[in-house]
Each structure stands twice: as C-alpha cells, then as structure tokens.
Image (cartoon, rainbow, N blue to C red):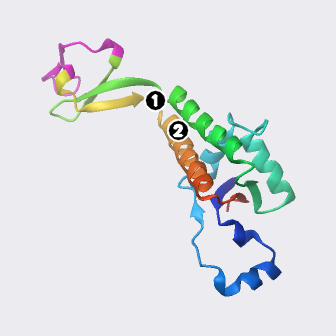
Amino acid sequence: MFKFYAVPAWKLLDEKTALAMGANAPEVEPLNCAATDPNLIELALAQVEYRGFKARDRALELLSAKNPAVFASSPNDLPALLRTADQLLTIAKMDAGERARVWRCQCGTRYAVPVALVRPVSLSCDRCGSTIELDPTNSVGETSVADAKTASVNATRHSLSEFFREAMARGWPVLVTKAG
C-alpha cells in the first residue's frame, strides 16, 4: 500500500546543496494527491501502464528499494506520466457504467432508468402506490448505474489523473511512499 505526493525538485537535493541554497529556498507545501485510500489507489493503478510496466507494480518495485522513491520527474517522465493520466481517465469512463435518468416519488423512493430506454410513461410507486410520471423533461438528474466500489475506484482514478497532471505542470517530481 502506498500514496503519492509531489515536491519541488530542489527539495530532493542532498543536504550540502540544500544548505547552500538555505535562505534562497522558499518554503513550499508539498502537493498531495486527493485520493487518500491506499487500497483504492492500488486498485485504480492495477490496469494502468507506466513506462512499459503496470503502474502499481512499478510503485511497489520502487518502494522495495527506497522509501520514499521518485516515481516520475519532469521533463523526462512527462510524456509517460501524462499517458498514464489519460489511461486512468479512459478506464474510469469504461467502468463508469450506463448513464441513467433519475426520478423521485413524493415518498422519496428513487427510480433510475437507463438513458437508452427513457420514454414518457407513468408507473405506480412500489412503496406508497402514488403515480410517478417518468417524463424525460422532469427527471431530477442523471447518474451512472454502477456499484459503490466501482464509483469509488473511478473517483480515485480521476484524482490520480488530476494529481499527475498538476505535478507535471509544476515540474515537480512525483514521489511514492508507503502508506500508514
């Protein structure tokens, strides 16, 4: 189990160089990934490739040698990490499930109908028996028909993608460390 964060490159310098920079080095907060659950991070990275390896396996390999370890650094790893971010978003879209329109009865019962099957129809509520008009123009929203675990993993994929892009935009190395 691991987590990601990013810091400016000068923070990774050896102590002698860092002391020489001393007063010139501004204090900067590290950039932390919004995804904090290590189990979800591992699941999110399980199918994603980074430099010819599964990203999850690469992170574990780096951590076996050093903790924390540099996972990616700009500019050499920029294209590879951006491809990884794209893959995270693509897999999240594929796993998101079918889009559905949502209606609510006056008693609070929620009804979801896949977008492909939506047409105006009336039905009787299973809970209270009142009539519900399933008219596409008056639905309360649109959602994805996916289980809670898949939705959590997809949210983690989105967070990791945003984090990788932000770290590379800043030019900061992405570090991986053991969680816990």
**Labelled disc at residue 48:** none
Q: Amino acid at mark 1?
A: Ala
Circle 2 is placed at which residue position?
A: 154
Residue appearing at x 65%, y 60% in the figure: 172
**Which SS class for mark 2?**
helix
Relative to residue 47, is residue 62 drawn left or right?
right
Relative to residue 149, is residue 67 drawn left or right?
right
Residue 151, horizontal then vertical, whole percent:
48, 37
Is residue 131 in the magenta section? yes
Of label 2 and label 1, which has the lower sequence position?
Answer: 1
Of residues 126 and 86, the one nearer the viewer is 86
Residue appearing at x 77%, y 59% in the figure: 69
Q: Quadrant of the C terminus?
A: bottom right
Mark 2 crowdedness (10 Å alpha carbons): few <14, some 14-19, many ≥20: many
* The residue positioned farthest toward the bottom in the image shown: 23
**Labelled disc at residue 146:** 1
**Which SS class for mark 1?**
loop
